[in-house]
Image (tube, rainbow, N blue to C red):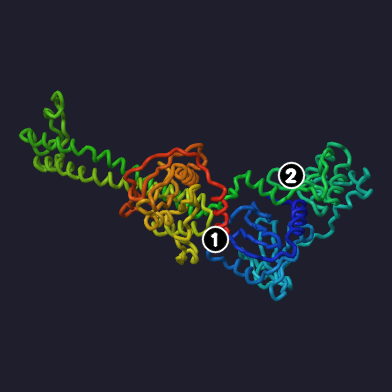
Amino acid sequence: MTLDVFFLQALVEQLNQRLAGSLVKKIYQTDETQLVFRFWTGRSEVPLLLCCEVGRARLHETSISCRNPLQPPRFCQLLRARLYRLERIELLDEDRLVALHFCSQDDMSYCLLLELFGRSPKLLLLDDQQRIVDLMRRVEDERYAPGSPYQRPLKEGMTALEQLIHPQFFSPRFFNELSQPFDQWLLQQVSPMSRAVAQTLAEEVRAQDCLQPVIGFVGAWQQGLLLPVQRGKVMTMREPAADEAVSQDARPDLSAWLEARLGRNGNEEPDRLAIDEALSRAVTAACRKLEKRRLRLETELVACGRAQDWQREGELLAVYRHLIRRGMTQVCVDDFYADPPMARCLPLDPVLSVQENIDARFHRARRARRGLTHCRQRLDETEQEQQWLDTLRLQIETADRVADLELLRQDLIAAGYYRPTRPSEQRRRAVSADEQVRRARTPGGLEILWGRNSRTNDYLSRQLLGPRDVWMHVHGAPGCHLVVKSDSGSVTEEDVLYAASIAAFYSSMRHETWAEVMVTDGKSVRHIKGARPGQVQVSQYRIVRVAPSVAQEVEASKSLSSSANS
């Protein structure tokens, strides 16, 4: 995905009108390529995303809740200390170079420069003398060394785009003297210009055999009437059609338009954080490892199932030991365990004596009986571990708080499935499970509590669940633990169904039409000794069938708490 210079011109103009003069309320860096500003315009808070990811470099207003690390990275801390007010946004040199001009609290000038060209887009902070203070992602290049002056790309000898409507470009002589295709000439000699616009204009000029398409495009560009369009992976602008009535005030919101295109291409859903890829990969690798273990245990379980066969073979050899001599490789006996009895040949080890062959059969039978219990126990543990990891996978994919992700990270580190690579991840961060409990109320006024990570679910079922409270969990699928507090022990069916729909919504069944939810009292829920956080055992329960949904007041409370944790 690429934003060409015409799209950036229009986008920067819109952003400048909305954000010029705004105060910087919050800055957070989600990863090494993405930065989010929250500006206060005096009337509302506007989030602005700046991304220098290869192939997805962009800036725009965003409605997506991005991950806010509990410990800000180095570059983010620098920006928080230096930037106070956004003075203006501009596009430099009619190129894909966006400058955000800031001032600090002591009136020092700074420029945050976003390079959207080249193989590796960059985000730099410059001081008032155009020296590089730092980069969000440092590179081994002397041109970008902190403290050195920033070198802007120069374009010399270029023809301005508005000059294309000059009479000299309408003469046949101009086209006769061109030694290269018209689109290549536009791209190399005209500024501003992009490959997508040059190819489109060249095709239209060739089809109509005149320069009217160029005249129309330049005129619409000068009047600010171009409309956004996506051509392949390029976001660019086009001249409005003859039947499209467009004015500068009626142009579409380019940030919303761009975000909609990104969503169509599989970007993050707007109601949750971007997925933590490192945690997701760790869970996927752990699931593969457990699947291999399960297959191996099932193979061993089949082998251990022959315990009775080994026992019977030993007894047959003991009965017919008078037929066995050292050095024999097999012996044929009458198997009186079969119905009807039948002849059977039993293999022997020629190196062993008669008694050693008999003892070997009984020894293998004892080992198989012991292994049978061990394999079944290990299979149960593996199944519980897989269920726990499936729950963690769902929680990672649907997380809407950074603190939730931090608790999930700690769980994976404690289980040995995730090894921190950065020093900031190796330090344990203070995150309270109690603070991550979600709260709402039923139509009858009873308090509802639920968790969105394993630690919070464990705290909820261990510490907050009373014997007369109602406990819920989606049946047979990963999901949250939900508790309806009730001192009297009586909860109406309306309240049960209301809470059950929330429990179904915050589970892997959230996109299904119907979901089955387990409902029981607190005294029927107990913790499994040695199990992972959030794993419990329910002695008795009933099933209610509900449609997964969440009320507007629950969504509102979730949004408020999410912004408070950002």
Q: Position of residue 148 (x, y in %)?
A: 69, 72
- Tell whether 311 sits left or right of 301: left
How many marks the image carries: the answer is 2
Residue 426 drawn above or below residue 510: below
Residue 454 drawn above or below residue 550: below
Disc number placed over residue 565 in the picture, else none: 1
Q: Which residue does the numbered mark 2 point to in the structure image?
A: 229
Question: Mark 2 against mark 1, which lies toward the viewer?
Answer: 1
Q: Position of residue 169 (x, y in %)?
A: 91, 47
Q: Position of residue 425 (x, y in %)?
A: 48, 63
Type of residue at label 2? Val
Asked whether the viewer can see residue 474, the reply is yes
How many neighbours does mark 2 have within 10 angstroms: few (below 14), some (14-19), or many (20 or more)?
A: some
Q: Quadrant of the C terminus?
A: bottom right
Outermost residue toward the left in this view: 322
Type of residue at label 1? Asn
Query: Dot 2: what SS?
Result: strand
- Tell whether 519 sits left or right of 211: left
Q: Quadrant of residue 324?
A: top left
* Distance from the alpha carbon under mark 2 to that under mark 1: 37 Å
How many neighbours does mark 1 have within 10 angstroms: few (below 14), some (14-19), or many (20 or more)?
A: some
Q: Nearer the viewer, residue 139 or 415?
A: 415
Query: Dot 1: what SS?
Result: helix
Q: Nearer the viewer, residue 441 or 6?
A: 441
Q: Of the residues under marks 2 and 1, which one precedes in the sequence? A: 2
